[in-house]
Amino acid sequence: MTFRFFASVLVRRAQKVDVPAVFADKVMKAGMKHIEIIAKAHRKVQSVEGLQQAALDEFGADLHIALRSRKDELLYLRKLTEMLFPYVMPPKATDC
């Protein structure tokens, strides 16, 4: 029953999303930003091995918090799950 509720919540929310608008607005901007950062990092390093670290350095303060360390990633996932849990589970399921 819980999985059914979860699936129905996801389907209802997915139907409300305007996919072309999201793609044109957010995905394209993020993609262009990533390409720009990789290009800057590629100019700074000579070998492919250092490209990943150079790209992470280029992101600077814009680097997602979950990418800083494994501990930060786990904390981020735990907080995200706690925040989303009430929205995708039936109201009584969060009491147990």
Image (tube, grey):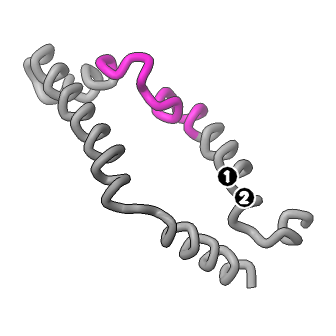
The residue located at (26%, 29%) in the rendering is 52
Distance from Cα at disc 2 to Cα at disc 1: 6 Å
Above or below for 14 versus 42: below
Measuring from the top left, give residue 78's x and y in whole percent. Answer: 68, 45
Q: Nearer the viewer, residue 21 or 31?
A: 21
Does the magenta run of residues contain 46?
Answer: no
Q: Measuring 72% from the left and 58% from the top, which residue is drawn there?
A: 85
Residue 71 position (above or below residue 10): above
* Badge 2 element: helix
The answer to whether residue 68 is above or below residue 46 is below
Asked if the residue under mark 1 is in contact with the one under mark 2, i.e. CB atoms within 8 Å, the reply is yes
Q: Position of 38 compared to 19: left or right?
A: left
Count neighbours of disc 2 (C-alpha within 10 A) and say few if under 14, some if 14 to 19, many if 20 or more.
Answer: some
Please give the range of residues in magenta.
Answer: 57-73
Disc 1, SS: helix
Q: Which residue is mark 2?
A: 85
Q: In the shown orientation, is residue 48 left or right of residue 90?
A: left
Q: Give the residue number, with chain letter if any, for mark 1.
A: 81
Q: Residue furthest top?
A: 44
Quarter of the figure with the N terminus: bottom right
Q: Position of residue 12 (x, y in %)?
A: 57, 74
